């Protein structure tokens, strides 16, 4: 009776309730149902692919419908994996047409998944790694490692060096231009942050019987230390388990993570998927491999160390229901929760507070293109698939996808829900992560600037400018900052050697550098401090005093990324998680 009442509350079948609550295994339920209906039961392990005469794409649809139509010569067989209210309909139909029972075979959702995945794995692998490159090459970063792209990057570097050796008037003009770009980038951050104040609205709760099936994809690699906490966090989501579909995608040779997950009591909500070996070994390729296998109307992406707030999926559904038909994605706010670890984690927390609590909500409110965060993106599945999903050759697939969605006429919103995650606690892990981010932003800028005129048409003037400032500006600010700082240091040292005192001499360029740096530090520090106040983590604010050092390190990461873009554009420098983590919630 309790299961039936729960089923009525969430608009599903009582069988799904019992299975989700581990009251009965799905296999036992389906075997019992088959005996009751007088039908057969099969694990599909020996069923050949030839029995299904349609395409792999149609075969994949069976995972959503739970129905597989097979043909053996002149005989037809209907394979059914009962889920949601499908079992109830099956009972009602066979009650009035018992003669159909011999032509029906029941199986479990897991056996159906194994059958489909076994026979379409080659298609999934090809699609995951090369579909975007084949169908929309203008949006793929796969050609950035070509000799022409390398020559373009080297040519740009030679141009910069040549300008540095040019007459003073050229040097001054270049420096003024760079300073103006940097200040305009800061101005956009201010405008976006001020807009956020007017943004947040509380929405009424959504009824559970109105909730759709929701999928979650998590790409995992060498994450044995993180999987237990991850599973606990996903089980804590306040969403009907009967409607949740969680896919963990693992590399085939990552035996330790496979073993760690199989030891946990995952339950029927979770499915383990092997990432294909073809193509680059990247997170976006792993996400692409799971996408055809999900059954949710919406799909969320999380990382191994994430702890989303329990109501996040419901808030995402609310946003999609309230939004327009062009709302493709909603982004939750990312919050660093290990600020006690080190100065790096405190600076990371300040950055994220300024970005996700102030800047991104503001530009999202203006319907401007924004780069997605690497986690807690919630997509309309249909739109995501239609847009080509993630680029497996881009090492910041999130930023690239956000811009591609904007170019295709869609927009992204920010929801008032947080995901708590871990920041690197020491320099080398931080440097590797930032190098990958900068390299991915460079890839994203190069991809979308292949045809600047078309980009202008797609995004419009305001969107085009936002793209240049958000993606190009972040790259330029980091690379130029190092040049400004070195030039300023050289000017101070030269003045001291010639006059015996510290100063800037009479150089206009040095004064320009000083003004730009000071304004940049003050505005960025103010936004970061405001973000920390909003996040109620003011004790981290002391770290902002050392922002100049942090910006120099960002410049190191940006130049390292540029070098890596030339030498190894698709290298994925993975961030290792759960290293001596001290969550802020710890006593």
Image (tube, rainbow, N blue to C red):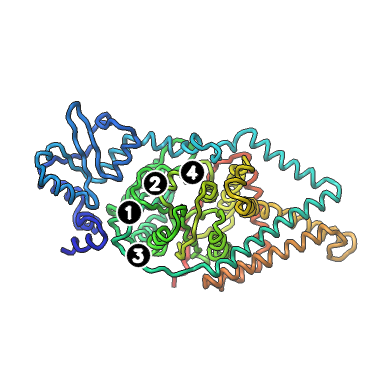
Q: Quadrant of residue 566?
A: top right
Any part of residue 343 in sight: no
The tag earlier along the polypeptide, 2 or 1, is 1
Crowd around label 3: few <14 · some 14–19 · many ≥20 (10 Å): few
Taking 202 as reference, is 307 above or below it? above
- Residue that mark 2 sits on: 249
C-alpha distance separating marks 4 and 3: 36 Å
Residue 250 locus on image (x, y percent): 40, 45
Crowd around label 4: few <14 · some 14–19 · many ≥20 (10 Å): many
- Residue that mark 3 sits on: 206
The one of 430 and 417 positioned closer to us in this rendering: 417
The tag earlier along the polypeptide, 3 or 1, is 3
325 relative to 557 in the view: left or right: left
User: Does dot 2 land on a helix, a strand or a loop?
Assistant: strand
- Residue that mark 4 sits on: 282
User: Does dot 4 land on a helix, a strand or a loop?
Assistant: loop
Contact between marks 2 and 1 (CB within 8 A): the answer is no
C-alpha distance separating marks 2 and 3: 30 Å
453 relative to 136 in the view: left or right: right
C-alpha distance separating marks 3 and 1: 14 Å
Instruction: Locate the N terminus and report the quarter of the image it occupies.
Output: bottom left
């Amino acid at each position: 009776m309790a299961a039936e009442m729960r089923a009525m509350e969430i608009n599903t079948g009582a069988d799904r309730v019992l299975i989700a609550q581990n009251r009965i295994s799905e296999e036992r339920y389906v075997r019992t149902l088959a005996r009751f209906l007088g039908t057969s039961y099969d694990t599909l392990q020996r069923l050949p692919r030839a029995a299904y005469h349609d395409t792999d794409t149609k075969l994949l649809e069976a995972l959503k419908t739970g129905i597989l139509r097979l043909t053996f010569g002149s005989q037809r067989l209907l394979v059914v994996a009962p889920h949601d209210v499908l079992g109830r309909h099956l009972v009602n139909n066979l009650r009035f047409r018992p003669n159909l029972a011999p032509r029906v075979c029941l199986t479990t959702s897991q056996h159906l998944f194994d059958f489909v995945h076994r026979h379409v794995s080659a298609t999934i692998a090809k699609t995951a790694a090369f579909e975007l490159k084949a169908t929309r090459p203008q949006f793929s970063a796969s050609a950035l490692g070509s000799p022409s792209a390398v020559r373009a990057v080297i040519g740009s570097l030679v141009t910069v060096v040549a300008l540095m050796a040019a007459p003073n008037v050229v040097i001054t003009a270049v420096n003024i231009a760079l300073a103006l770009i940097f200040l305009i980038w800061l101005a956009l951050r201010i405008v976006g942050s001020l807009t956020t104040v007017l943004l947040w609205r509380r929405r009424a709760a959504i009824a559970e019987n109105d909730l759709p099936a929701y999928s979650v994809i998590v790409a995992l690699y060498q994450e044995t230390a993180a999987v237990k906490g991850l599973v606990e966090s996903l089980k804590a989501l306040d969403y009907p388990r009967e409607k949740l579909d969680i896919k963990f995608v693992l590399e085939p040779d990552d035996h330790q993570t496979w073993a760690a997950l199989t030891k946990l009591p995952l339950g029927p909500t979770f499915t383990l998927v092997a990432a294909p070996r073809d193509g680059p070994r990247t997170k976006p390729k792993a996400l692409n491999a799971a996408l055809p296998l999900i059954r949710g109307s919406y799909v969320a992406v999380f990382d191994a160390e994430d702890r989303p707030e329990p109501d996040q999926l419901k808030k995402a559904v609310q946003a999609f229901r309230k939004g327009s038909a062009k709302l493709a994605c909603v982004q939750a706010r990312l919050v660093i929760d290990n600020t006690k670890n080190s100065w790096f984690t405190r600076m990371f927390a300040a950055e994220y507070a300024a970005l996700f609590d102030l800047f991104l909500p503001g530009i999202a409110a203006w319907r401007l293109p924004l780069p997605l965060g690497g986690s807690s993106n919630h997509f309309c599945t249909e739109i995501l698939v239609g847009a080509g999903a993630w680029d497996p050759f881009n090492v910041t697939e999130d930023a690239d996808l956000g811009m591609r969605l904007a170019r295709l006429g869609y927009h992204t919103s920010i929801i008032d829900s947080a995901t708590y995650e871990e920041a690197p606690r020491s320099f080398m892990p931080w440097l590797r992560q930032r190098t990958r981010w900068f390299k991915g932003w460079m890839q994203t800028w190069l991809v979308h600037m292949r045809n600047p005129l078309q980009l202008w048409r797609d995004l419009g003037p305001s969107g085009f400018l936002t793209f240049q400032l958000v993606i190009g500006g972040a790259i330029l600010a980091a690379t130029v900052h190092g040049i400004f700082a070195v030039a300023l240091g050289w000017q101070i040292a030269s003045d001291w050697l010639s006059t015996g005192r510290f100063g800037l001499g009479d150089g206009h360029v040095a004064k320009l550098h000083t003004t730009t740096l000071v304004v940049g530090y003050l505005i960025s520090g103010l936004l970061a401090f405001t973000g920390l106040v909003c996040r109620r983590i003011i004790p981290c604010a002391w770290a902002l005093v050392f922002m100049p050092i942090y910006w120099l390190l960002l410049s190191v990461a940006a130049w390292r990324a540029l070098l890596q873009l030339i030498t190894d554009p698709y290298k994925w420098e993975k961030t290792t998680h759960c290293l001596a983590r001290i969550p802020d919630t710890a006593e």
